Amino acid sequence: MQNIRYSSIDGTSKGYYGLLGLFGLMALVGYLASHYMESHGHVVTGMTNQIVWGTPHVFAVFLIVAASGALNVASIASVFGKISYKPLARLSGLLSLCLLLGGLLVLVLDLGRPDRLIVAMTKYNFKSIFAWNIILYNGFFLIVGVYLWMMMERKMNRFTKPVGFIAFVWRLILTTGTGSIFGFLVARQAYDAAVMAPMFIIMSFSFGLAIFLLVLMAAYKWTQRPLGDALVFRLKNLLGVFVAAVLYFVIAFHLTNLYATEHHGIERFILMDGGIYTQLFWWVQILLGSLVPLALFYLPAFSKSRTAAAIGAVLVTIGGLAQMYVIIIGGQAFPLELFPGMEVSSSFYDGVVANYVPSMPEFLLGLGGVAIALAAVMAAIKALDFLPDSLADSVADPHYKPAASGSEATA
């Protein structure tokens, strides 16, 4: 592999400013949506006393989980010594920070009283997994920021591997904490499972790498920088492994629940009788988000197509959002098990499946978080040297062999 030269993008074209302006507009609309919800109360949303985490939380948790996974490319290079991933490490670290920023902003703006975040940051209840996550998120920003400094400052390059190892361990803990939010909730039949933590870790690998692949391909296409097939297909194949692993954990999770009689109700709800949740699970999460991408990544007819790789990454992202929707909202919609083995009914909708219809402000707030994350990436790659000038096979592929000349081929 040749020496990699990094540089910032020009960012002076109409296309650049047009896309940045679009993301800025989406972010502004998201803020106005949050202001509307704060001013009128959550009665203008689809959220109720039964479903307290709505569509904004789906976007927020998805972005936070993807942020951890986006750092995976840098970890593979620094911690595991895979030299072919080293040119991508800077962009990997940047994208992870930007995705986490977008996700946390959605959470803060959905609090109803964003100023209450000060209380959460200054008064800790260490019996609460939410308090742990405040520390984990802040630590992630600090550690990955230092990690980027080690990579970008030549004099500090010798510290890249140890700091990268700390970042790798920290992000595993962070994603474990996020998954444990649901795994520790014993009151909800859809949660309360130790497998939630490792499942969220492998979900982060899948979602984060899918977004990373799309950002990488878009950045190099729009800036007309060389991007070789070897790197794209290597990332695509790795993404396929993660998608298959997520599918395995999902199957294991539901089979385990089906073995226990106490979970038969929620399993029937999600897998058969849940309406929109059942449709999202089978058609979007499993079919479009898992099986179709695996076919696009590995079937001979599509395995050498960049377009198929990009479509597969988009479908993995959409499937990930559907998976979060089913976990977060579907898990709340199913009634609480107040008295096991008994039928419960009351004027407070006990024993009744909760109704939830996402409102436009919720959806716009979630999209605003995505827009902020992508706008931050665009601004950063214009300001600092995050992108290699070339990722052509001759530069980025350590196994590259020049094609033989005509006389050599004849001989």
Image (spheres, helix red, strand yellow):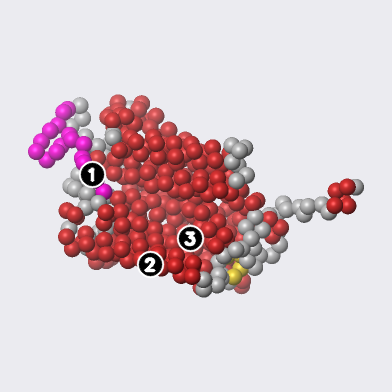
Q: For the residue marked with disc 3, what is the amino acid?
A: Leu
Per the image, is 231 magenta?
Answer: no
- At mark 3, the secondary structure is helix
Q: Nearer the viewer, residue 242 or 23?
A: 23
Question: Compared to 255, does 384 lie above or below?
Answer: below
Crowd rating for badge 3 (residues with CA inside 10 Å; few <14, some 14–19, many 20+): many
Q: CA distance from mark 3 to mark 2?
A: 17 Å
Q: Which tag is nearer the camera, tag 2 or tag 1?
A: 2
Per the image, is 351 magenta?
Answer: yes
Query: What is the x, y in percent for residue 56?
Result: 30, 53
Q: Main secondary structure of the magenta part?
A: loop
Identify the residue at image location x=47%, y=48%: 314
Identify the residue at image location x=61%, y=72%: 155
Identify the residue at image location x=88%, y=47%: 410
Q: Which tag is nearer the camera, tag 3 or tag 2?
A: 2
The part of the image, by quadrant, that contains residue 102 is: bottom left
Q: Quadrant of the N terminus?
A: bottom right
Whether residue 123 appears in this view of the structure is: no
- At mark 1, the secondary structure is loop
Q: Which tag is nearer the camera, tag 3 or tag 1?
A: 1
Q: CA distance from mark 3 to mark 1?
A: 32 Å
Query: What is the x, y in percent for residue 363?
Result: 30, 54
Does label 3 or label 1 sit earlier along the sequence? 3
Q: Which residue is most to the left? A: 347
Q: For the residue marked with disc 2, what is the amino acid?
A: Gly
- Which numbered circle lies on residue 24? 2
Q: Mark 1 and mark 3 in contact (Cβ < 8 Å)? A: no
Q: Mark 2 and mark 3 in contact (Cβ < 8 Å)? A: no
- Which numbered circle lies on residue 49? none
- The residue pinned by badge 1 equals 356
- Which numbered circle lies on residue 95? 3
Give the residues in magenta: 342-358
